[in-house]
Amino acid sequence: MSLPLEGLSAIVTGAGRGLGRAEALELARLGAAVVVNDYGQPGRDGSGAASAAPAEEVAAEIRRAGGRAVAHLGDIADFETARALTDLAVAEFGKLDVLVNNAGILRDRMVFSMSEEEWDSVIRVHLKGHFNTTHFAAVHWRTRAKAGETGVYGRIVNTSSEAFLAGSAGQPNYAAAKGGIVGLTTSTALALARYGVTANAICPRARTRMTEDVFAGFAEPTAEGDLDPLSPEHVAPLVGYLASPAAAGVNGQLLVVHGGMVAIVDRPRVAAKFDTAKEAFTYEELDGLLTPHYASRPAGETFAASEVLGLKKG
């Protein structure tokens, strides 16, 4: 019996550690040949010297298990590096079929304390990085379709975050980038559907180097040998599914995933609607309509992080 991704090739960015590593291993387990990309900097804020070691270690692990993989050292927020990454997949495996965008950094700060560089660096790696790789993958698939190839296969899985959905007071740069990734995903889904390509985004919850302080003390394994409820291995199977032929009908979607749970996030819906009694609204009319509406709701509609994430300490 053939594997779901047999004969397909994939790129996974930020695959040297954490979520990206788990995703690369899962795609390989399902039969895909994988380009393992990572810039290899030790700091979760993008600090430290670049290193090929993390990507090479994951690629070697895939090969030891009988799969095919090649490592790529590079900063995908650089446009030409993203081009070279796509070219590598085509050169090594003949074509590109799956793109998983995962690479990211953190530079957390309240909005009133955040520097321009802290803002720019996070937007650059997350949002521009997702665009760069998506652009070159899209060019690859569109060129093949325009050349008359039938049955072009393409899957994009992007990484957003619940910081975009629920807000995160100390992460205005990260939340904005992750919201932008959702917009990029839905636009890409519409643009590439005609070529046989799907694009979806996930909001994963996982305990990694990036989130170790966020999830410190939350949902720890209760017994030795139990899988951590926040292990990246809970997220990777959804990425494998979205990369597969079985997910051909899933496009432009946003899904939250963590230990044993997948939630499909609906598009925003109108909570209330008001029409002017005259030709145009006045300040007084809006005050009479909107102020009572918001006064009847919980103050600020704010929630504790544990409530938003659905996690409990202990």
Image (cartoon, rainbow, N blue to C red):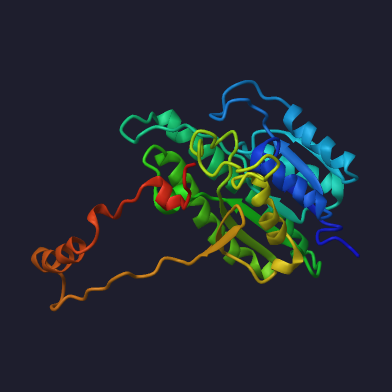
Residue 307 x, y percent position in the rendering: 40, 51
Q: Which residue is drawn at 43% across and 39% down?
A: 173
Residue 285 figure quarter? bottom left
Residue 92 figure quarter? top right
Residue 89 x, y percent position in the rendering: 79, 46
Residue at far front of view: 223
**Is residue 218 something that shows in the picture?**
yes
* Location of residue 173 with respect to 254 vertically, above or below: above
Which sits in the foreground, 3 or 71? 3
**Is residue 80 something that shows in the picture?**
no
Residue 77 x, y percent position in the rendering: 60, 38
* Location of residue 121 with respect to 19 vertically, above or below: above
Residue 6 figure quarter? bottom right
Query: Horizontal placement of 282 versus 1: left or right?
Result: left
Q: Which residue is drawn at 39% across and 48% down?
A: 167
Q: Residue at x 45, y 47 (%)?
A: 163
Query: Horizontal placement of 140 versus 201: left or right?
Result: right
